[in-house]
């Protein structure tokens, strides 16, 4: 999937998981005059609440997984995650280190992977363009969900559940009414 | 007494490319105390020497940091060569010096850009990084990589760089001088930049000595300290090296030290290219390491220390690296106490922090 056009200016937020800086400076190099993605309105903003694309470099560990998760959760929907560099994809050369859990996808869902040590700016830009395609698809899905009349949505949802059930072969356990009541009471007490 | 508040700074912050966390204890707008906490990037790569043999370890040590990666590769190789008892050919030592100084030009240009970004001078940031791309092109042409090069190996260099390429490098760098001067003059002469940096974060000579600061941080406080003077590594003695020292000890002085070092590095490269002898660039090394060796290197950020100890097999028993940012953090905490909250980003940047070096 690729974005033939960009309707809005996608803003990126960048976080360094436990990378060696190599990919970080290449991410910044994308924004500076040689590669200059700012001419397409792509801006590196420091605030996750303004961002559409999350660029993560480096692998995750016990100390930073909470921060990666938190930044991801603060971003508004729709959002796209790009794992930059082989460390963010799988842990890379540091995979065997005791303080490396592995790729970023251990913690948050990733939409595009950029291999390379360090990832080249061209590859990062390519991945962001791919990510924009995913972003557009996610946005379309959201718009569809909002525009469609309630009945249609319910029908579509029921259909989706039915096909998923067919795939899974068995009905997944759902809360019974009694359980829901108990859960609600517990929640209210808290 | 004003009420005290604690403002968290980082690990994710717009001016920080890397995560470091500071708890800033404030009284109104003034920082009373800064409590740093690190550990977001710790990987534990020194322990990898148990499962990677000493030649593979060079690749790992090089990836401690993507900005000063050539220096790390050199340091690792030099410590292993010492442990192996190998002498490196003279041409390899010259080539290493040339590439290390080229790395310093790239690192300082990168830092000048980040500093400009730190005080909100976006166009200056972009100009610094535009010039830096030319240096990266030189790296790519001569070593094959933009950021991580892997051209050092125990016993010398992986490949030779031809004399024509070296002369072209000097020609391009000399052509860059005018452009760099145009940009760095803005740092020195522009009144808005002066207002942000002059007299901010003063570190006196005594404090710098006491806190064991290294690199441009200590040279900005008037201390003539540079590992290149010792002649432990490279060919700096033959090149007649003299460090750049500024007396004021504020952010401006540290910036001026780095600016002067850019031009000095270009001159050192020019001299080294004139003097470089012909000959082989590598020697054969034994397959098993026994013995130990330590070496110090002047990285763009200051003194770095490398230690390798063998155990009679191809695996090292211990590989130890001590990096400059780690040593400069006490100086940073000292500078932050009493500073304005608005000055905190540029004070953090002024020691040229490299957190992935610090934590490894």
Image (cartoon, coloured by chain):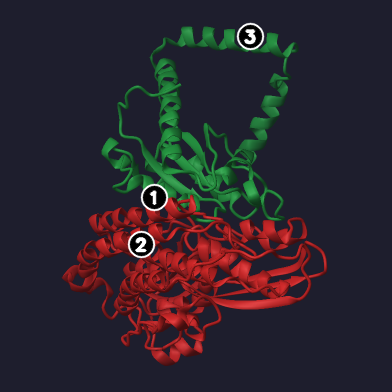
Identify residue for label 1.
A28
In the image, which lettered chain appears green?
A
Q: CA distance from mark 1 to mark 2?
A: 30 Å
Q: How many labels were placed on the picture?
A: 3
Chain of residue at mark 1? A
Chain of residue at mark 3? A
**Dot 2: within a 10 Å radius of its alpha carbon, few (fewer than 14), some, or many (20 or more) residues?**
some
Specify the label residue A163 is tagged with: 3
Report the mark closest to the observer, 1 or 2.
Answer: 2
Q: Percent from the top left, x then y, of residue A20?
A: 54, 56
Q: CA distance from mark 2 to mark 3?
A: 68 Å
B72 on left or right of B115: right
State which quadrant residue A173 falls in.
top right
Report the mark closest to the observer, 2 or 3.
Answer: 2
Identify residue for label 2.
B167
Chain of residue at mark 2? B
Q: CA distance from mark 3 to mark 1?
A: 44 Å
At 29% from the left and 63% from the top, the residue drawn is B119
Q: Percent from the top left, x then y, of residue A158?
A: 58, 9
At 83% from the left and 68% from the top, the residue drawn is B312
Using the rendered image, report if marks 2 and 3 lie on a common chain: no
Q: Colour of chain B?
A: red
């Amino acid at each position: 999937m690729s974005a033939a056009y960009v309707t809005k200016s996608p803003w990126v937020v960048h976080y360094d998981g436990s990378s060696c800086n190599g990919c970080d400076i290449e991410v910044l190099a994308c924004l500076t005059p040689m590669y200059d993605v700012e001419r397409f309105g792509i801006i590196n903003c420091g605030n996750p609440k303004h961002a559409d694309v999350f660029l993560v470099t480096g692998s995750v560990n016990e100390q930073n997984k909470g921060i990666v998760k938190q930044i991801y959760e603060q971003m508004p929907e729709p959002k796209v995650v790009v794992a930059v560099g082989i460390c963010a994809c799988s842990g890379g050369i540091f995979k065997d280190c005791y303080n490396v859990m592995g790729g970023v996808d251990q913690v948050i869902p990733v939409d595009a992977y950029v291999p390379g040590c360090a990832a080249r700016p061209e590859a990062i830009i390519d991945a962001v363009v791919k990510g924009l395609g995913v972003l557009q698809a996610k946005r379309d899905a959201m718009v569809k969900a909002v525009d469609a009349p309630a009945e249609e949505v319910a029908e579509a949802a029921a259909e989706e559940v039915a096909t998923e059930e067919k795939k899974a072969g068995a009905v997944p356990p759902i809360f019974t009414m009694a359980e829901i009541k108990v859960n609600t009471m517990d929640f209210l007490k808290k | 007494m004003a009420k005290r508040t604690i403002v968290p700074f980082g690990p994710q912050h717009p001016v920080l490319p890397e995560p470091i966390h500071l708890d800033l204890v404030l009284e109104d707008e003034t920082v009373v105390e800064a409590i740093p906490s690190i550990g977001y990037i710790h990987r534990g790569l020194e322990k990898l020497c148990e499962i990677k043999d000493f030649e593979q370890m060079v690749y790992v040590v090089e990836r401690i940091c993507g900005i000063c990666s050539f220096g790390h590769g050199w340091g690792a190789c030099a410590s292993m060569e010492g442990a192996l008892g190998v002498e490196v050919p003279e041409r390899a030592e010259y080539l290493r010096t040339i590439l290390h100084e080229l790395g310093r030009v790239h690192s300082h240009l990168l830092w000048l850009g980040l500093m400009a970004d730190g005080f909100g001078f976006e166009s200056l940031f972009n100009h610094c990084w535009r010039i830096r791309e030319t240096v990266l092109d030189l790296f790519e042409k001569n070593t094959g990589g933009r950021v991580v090069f892997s051209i050092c190996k125990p016993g010398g260099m992986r490949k030779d760089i031809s004399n024509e390429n070296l002369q072209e490098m000097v020609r391009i760098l000399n052509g860059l001088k005018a452009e760099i001067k145009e940009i760095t003059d803005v740092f020195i002469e522009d009144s808005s930049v002066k207002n942000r940096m002059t007299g901010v974060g003063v570190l006196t000579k005594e404090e710098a000595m006491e806190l064991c600061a290294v690199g441009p941080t200590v040279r900005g406080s008037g201390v003539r300290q540079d590992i290149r003077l010792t002649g432990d590594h490279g060919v700096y003695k033959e090149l007649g090296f003299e460090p750049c020292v500024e007396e004021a000890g504020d952010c401006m002085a540290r910036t001026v030290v780095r600016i002067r070092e850019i031009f000095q590095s270009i001159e050192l490269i020019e001299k080294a290219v004139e003097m470089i002898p012909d000959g082989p660039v590598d020697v054969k090394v034994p397959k098993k390491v026994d013995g130990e060796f330590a070496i110090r290197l002047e990285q763009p950020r200051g003194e770095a220390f490398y230690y390798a100890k063998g155990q009679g097999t191809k695996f090292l028993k211990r590989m130890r690296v001590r990096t400059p940012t780690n040593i400069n953090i006490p100086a940073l905490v000292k500078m932050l106490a009493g500073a304005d909250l608005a000055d905190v980003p540029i004070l953090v940047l002024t020691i040229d922090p490299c957190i992935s070096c610090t934590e490894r």
